[in-house]
Image (tube, rainbow, N blue to C red):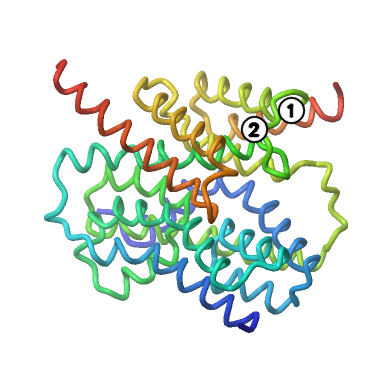
């Protein structure tokens, strides 16, 4: 069995390529928050307390639009509802751990770390495999906090024209490279993507992500069931 | 509500969505069928983030014509299918996007 440190480092190595777009995302968040009128301290507080890019962007966007606190909090909840599914997937692998580890793991349960550690968990049965997720999560945490600081300092000196925000969907695309050759996965992807795009304006509270994801899972439920019948 | 109270509430709800399932679900609740469907979670969620970021403009309207992100995403997908390489996928997408907006 590998040592805790080795598994932790494997998490760092696996998640690293996906950290490239986190830098511009953190920069953009820092710049936007200051631009909207949050103090540097409050901007930093958001990255430390919330530690979720999409949640933080939604918070400041709605805040600047004058939305009520209740709308803001429920929208952040809706954007985050995908984490319920991440938690459901991960829970099987961490159910024997102490509560304190479950709390630590939950704080670090972000998109990239989830996707890569989920793959690692499936291939490894060691008791300390959860250190992989902590390694990936800590890596993202350090990069997210430092890029927020940079965004606060640099302000608007970074040209918007570079279109660095495009790196965000590209990262998620790269997380799916192993899916493109499987027909069921492709159908699920197209279903979810189309519903999210078409429903973006019509589904309230930015809940389009979870609505589209649940529709995609329903399609997966049906298609995998049929697949068994034909086998 | 003060700015800080709002930040703390948003932090709490973010944490609770991550923590609740980890805390509530037990190993015994899983069987092969549940595992099979849950294995599609990344496949079902990520396109819901990818598609709107590519096909919608800043105001949330669908933008098909004169949208370099679509072609750049198609190139990145193609590179992804053939190489299955993460870095190649991200960089081919960014490089073709910059080529389309700065050179073409």
Disc number placed over residue A34 in the picture, else none: none
- What residue appears at the point 69 percent right and 72 percent down from the top-left corner? A43
| Chain letter for mark 1 | B
Disc number placed over residue B55 in the picture, else none: 2
Q: Quadrant of residue A153?
A: bottom right
* CA–CA distance in space, label 2 to label 1: 8 Å
Name the image quarter holding the C terminus of chain A: top left
Residue A50 placed where, x, y %?
A: 54, 69
User: Residue A41 versus residue A100: which sits nearer the camera?
Assistant: A41
Q: Which residue is mark 1?
A: B67
Going from the N terminus, do you reach mark 2 or mark 1 first?
2
Q: Secondary structure at mark 2?
A: helix
- Label 1: few (<14), some or many (≥20) within 10 Å? some
User: Residue A146 versus residue A86: which sits nearer the camera?
Assistant: A86
Horizontal side of B35 relative to B86 (left or right) equals left
* Residues under numbered marks 2 and 1 in contact, where contact means CB atoms less than 8 Å apart: yes
Residue B93 placed where, x, y %?
A: 66, 30
Residue A7 placed where, x, y %?
A: 36, 55
């Amino acid at each position: 069995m590998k040592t805790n440190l080795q598994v932790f480092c494997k998490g760092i190595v696996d998640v690293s390529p996906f950290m490239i777009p986190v830098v511009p995302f953190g920069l953009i968040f820092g710049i936007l928050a200051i631009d909207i009128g949050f103090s540097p301290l409050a901007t930093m507080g958001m990255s430390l307390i919330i530690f979720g890019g999409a949640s933080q962007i939604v918070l400041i966007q709605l805040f600047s639009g004058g939305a009520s606190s209740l709308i803001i909090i429920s929208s952040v909840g809706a954007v985050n509802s995908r984490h319920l599914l991440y938690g459901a997937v991960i829970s099987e692998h961490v159910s024997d751990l102490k509560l304190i580890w479950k709390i630590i793991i939950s704080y670090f349960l972000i998109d990239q770390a989830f996707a890569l550690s989920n793959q690692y968990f499936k291939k490894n049965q060691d008791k300390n495999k959860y250190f992989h997720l902590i390694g990936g999560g800590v890596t993202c945490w350090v990069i997210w906090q430092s890029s927020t600081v940079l965004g606060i300092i640099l302000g608007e000196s970074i040209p918007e024209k570079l279109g660095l925000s495009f790196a965000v969907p590209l990262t998620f695309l790269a997380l799916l490279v192993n899916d493109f050759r499987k027909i069921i996965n492709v159908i699920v992807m197209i279903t979810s993507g189309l519903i999210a795009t078409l429903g973006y304006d019509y589904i309230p509270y930015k809940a389009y992500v979870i609505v589209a994801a649940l529709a995609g899972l329903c399609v997966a439920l049906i298609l995998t069931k049929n697949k068994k019948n034909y086998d | 509500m003060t700015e800080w109270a709002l930040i703390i509430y948003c932090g709490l709800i973010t944490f609770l969505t991550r923590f609740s399932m980890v805390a509530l679900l037990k190993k015994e609740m899983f069987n092969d069928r549940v595992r099979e469907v849950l294995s599609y979670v990344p496949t079902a969620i990520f396109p819901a983030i990818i598609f709107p970021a590519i096909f919608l403009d800043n105001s949330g309207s669908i933008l098909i014509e004169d949208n370099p992100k679509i072609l750049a995403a198609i190139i990145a997908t193609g590179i992804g299918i053939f190489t299955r390489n993460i870095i190649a996928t991200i960089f081919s997408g960014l490089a073709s996007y910059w080529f389309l907006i700065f050179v073409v």
